């Protein structure tokens, strides 16, 4: 694995960093209220237009869709730079859930589906959502509990069910919904369907009030009631939805790590700048050993997190599933990000919890990261069970691949 960045990637990294610093971060002032979806979308379109002009738009897809065609390893560098602002990923059109849906449509969508759904999504003309999570007793961290069903009725499929905490659903043009299509126990027998928002059987019933305030389209409850779709709405193959969910979620959990690492880095940048300027007890805050230790711990953990992301991304580029490595990264990076942001607030004191700087918003936005795409506890159980199976078989050896 090559740790150095190519000349081309270094130049792009600097260009993205400049774009975020000069265009995106100034746009953070006076953000619309969370429920003003139309205003958020207008801001998103404006920033995406400027991203195109700066040559930093859509890093993750190829030129055939108007993108830069970067591999996962290169995206890890660019996504981190974008993540230094909550508006950055939206500006570059590499934000969740659209980025994960683009990946899925690119991998398993038919040519017709790619033209109808992927192309406008890649162009930033529309947003999308991914509807798998359900209210209890339905699917959450355990997709085997999926309750939403899709039944065949002549040439149509009829979807019925409730979805919960569907990010970006308000104002989304379409969603990818997981529904059970076969009476099979466990993690099999589900299918993915593409459902357009104007389908009369589809309805966003509520926007859920949440801790975070900057997610375009919010987090919503969605109802599918006698929602009819054609056979062409099936994404991929019938009954293979759980496998496709993993195809989407493995890189998606890693791209979350990439983006939020940027937020943690900017938090540390802010705390370091504050510590070197703030005078207290006759000296700079940065001269106090307790503050130095917090700064150093954050730098150590950010460095380790970045290397975990790069290595998992490199494995994806080699064609490997990287299930273990993306789980390891999801646990470590999500908890690192929370610790780094928390330390930055502690260093900055009252400045840290005020709305005059980005730290308070980062604190709200990043707390979810330890929960979505698999809570830390679920990933730990998965990691441990894999270790135990290996120990009981041919033997467990800690390895990097």
Image (cartoon, rainbow, N blue to C red):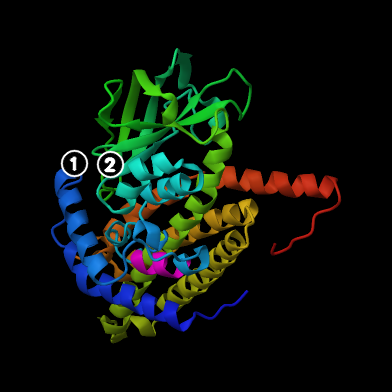
Q: Is residue 142 visible?
A: no
- Quadrant of image for the C terminus: bottom right
Q: CA distance from mark 1 to mark 2?
A: 7 Å
- Seen as rendered, the residue at the extreme right is 394
**Residue for badge 1:** 35
Q: Is residue 331 visible?
A: yes
**Residue for badge 2:** 218
The residue positioned 84% from the left and 45% from the top of the image is 392
How packed is label 2: few (under 14 Cα within 10 Å), some, or many (20 or more)? many
User: Left or right of 349: which side holds 38?
Assistant: left
- Quadrant of image for the N terminus: bottom right
Instruction: Give the vertical position of 310 relative to 362 (above or below).
Output: below
| Part of the protein shown in magenta | 76-82
Do the residues bearing badges 1 and 2 touch, measured as CB atoms within 8 Å?
Answer: yes
Give x and y (percent) for residue 96.
38, 50
Q: Earlier in the sequence, mark 1 or mark 2?
A: 1
Of residues 399 and 38, the one nearer the viewer is 38
Give x and y (percent) for residue 190.
54, 27
User: Left or right of 165: which side holds 126?
Assistant: left
């Amino acid at each position: 694995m090559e740790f150095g960045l190519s000349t081309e990637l270094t130049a792009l990294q600097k260009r993205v960093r400049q774009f975020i610093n000069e265009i995106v971060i100034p746009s953070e002032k006076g953000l619309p209220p969370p429920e003003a979806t139309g205003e958020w979308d207008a801001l998103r379109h404006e920033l995406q237009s400027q991203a195109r002009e700066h040559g930093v738009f859509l890093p993750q897809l190829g030129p055939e869709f108007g993108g830069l065609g970067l591999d996962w390893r290169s995206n890890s560098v660019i996504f981190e730079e974008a993540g230094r602002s909550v508006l950055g990923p939206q500006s570059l059109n590499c934000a969740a859930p659209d980025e994960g849906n683009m990946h899925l449509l690119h991998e398993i969508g038919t040519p017709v589906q790619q033209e109808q759904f992927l192309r406008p999504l890649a162009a930033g003309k529309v947003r999308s959502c991914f509807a798998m999570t359900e209210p209890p007793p339905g699917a959450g961290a355990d997709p085997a509990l999926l309750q939403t069903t899709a039944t065949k009725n002549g040439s149509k499929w009829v979807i019925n069910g409730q979805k919960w905490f569907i990010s970006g659903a308000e104002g989304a043009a379409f969603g990818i919904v997981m529904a059970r299509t076969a009476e099979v126990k466990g993690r099999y027998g589900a299918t993915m369907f593409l459902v357009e928002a104007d389908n009369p059987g589809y309805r966003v019933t509520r926007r859920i009030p949440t801790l975070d305030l900057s997610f375009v389209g919010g987090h919503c409850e969605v109802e599918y009631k006698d929602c009819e779709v054609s056979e062409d709405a099936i994404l991929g193959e019938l009954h293979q939805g759980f496998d496709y969910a993993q195809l989407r979620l493995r890189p998606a959990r890693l791209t979350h790590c990439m983006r939020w690492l940027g937020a943690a880095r900017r938090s540390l940048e802010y705390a370091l700048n504050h510590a070197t300027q703030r005078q207290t007890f006759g000296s700079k805050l940065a001269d106090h050993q307790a503050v130095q230790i917090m700064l150093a711990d954050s730098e150590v953990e950010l460095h380790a997190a970045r290397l975990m992301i790069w290595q998992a991304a490199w494995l994806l580029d080699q064609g490997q599933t990287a299930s273990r490595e993306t789980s390891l990264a999801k646990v470590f990076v999500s908890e690192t990000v929370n610790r780094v942001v928390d330390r930055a607030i502690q260093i900055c004191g009252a400045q840290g919890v005020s709305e005059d700087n980005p730290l308070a918003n980062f604190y709200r936005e990043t707390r979810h990261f330890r929960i979505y795409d698999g809570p830390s506890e679920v990933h730990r159980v998965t990691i441990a069970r894999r270790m135990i199976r290996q120990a009981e078989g041919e033997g467990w050896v800690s390895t990097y691949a």
